[in-house]
Amino acid sequence: MSSTIEDYLSLIYVLERDGEPVVGTHLTGSGWQSARTVMRRHMLMEWMMVRMLPWSKLHSEAHHLEHAVSSMTEATLMEELNHPQTCPHGNSLPGCEEAVASWIRLTEIPKGETVTIRRIHQRGECISASWGRLKRGLS
């Protein structure tokens, strides 16, 4: 699979969102808007396929479709999906960062504590080796 400019925009968006600035790289206002659009469309594709595909396949399949989504389809999916604030993996849609701001990192939980995992970081979405051990809690 070859990388596209949208792939690079998405990567920069995720790193910056998570407080890991990319040295030597700066997105213009239109670059940020493009990155946010690609990320939102990717996440909407994941929601569209969540009941049809194994959870571990959502990210890679959404990657193939995100570039083909029109503005009309994006708006329709947002409406049909009741304006989700996160993707199925729990990552916030662009503009909805406050929805996850109060969530606590797993590394900050005391050993032995029972927790509900609400988010799998984008970098972990492609690693499906341990998905079978997690109980899926999608509604």
Image: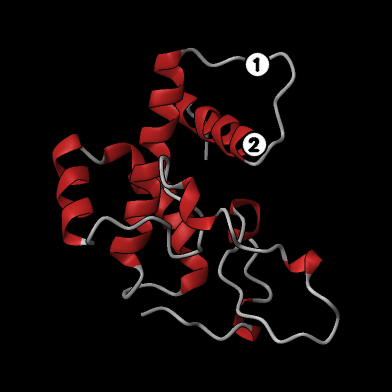
- Color style of the picture: secondary structure
Horizontal arrangement in the rendering, residue 83 relative to residue 89 (left or right): left
Instruction: Indicate the position of residue 14 as horizontal and vertical percent values.
Output: 58, 39
The Cα–Cα distance between marks 1 and 2, rounded to whole angstroms, is: 11 Å
Label placed on residue 25? 1
Instruction: Indicate the position of residue 131 as horizontal and vertical percent values.
Output: 61, 76
Instruction: Indicate the position of residue 18 as horizontal and vertical percent values.
Output: 65, 41
Residue 130 occupies quadrant: bottom right
First in residue order: circle 1 vs circle 2: 2
- The type of residue carrying mark 2 is Leu
Horizontal arrangement in the rendering, residue 23 relative to residue 28 (left or right): right
| Residue in view at x 62 percent, y 32 percent | 16
Q: Is residue 94 above or below residue 6?
A: below
Secondary structure type for disc 1:
loop
Secondary structure type for disc 2:
helix
Estimate how packed mark 2 is, as few (under 14), some (14 to 19) or many (20 or more) residues with alpha carbons within 10 Å. Answer: few
Label placed on residue 61? none
Q: Is residue 105 above or below residue 22?
A: below
Q: Can you identify the residue that label 2 sits on?
A: 15
| Residue in view at x 86 percent, y 81 percent | 111
Residue 6 occupies quadrant: top left
Q: Is residue 8 above or below residue 73?
A: above
Are dots 1 and 2 in contact, CB under 8 Å? no
**Front position in the image: 113 or 43:** 113
Horizontal arrangement in the rendering, residue 79 relative to residue 47 (left or right): left
**Front position in the image: 121 or 112:** 112
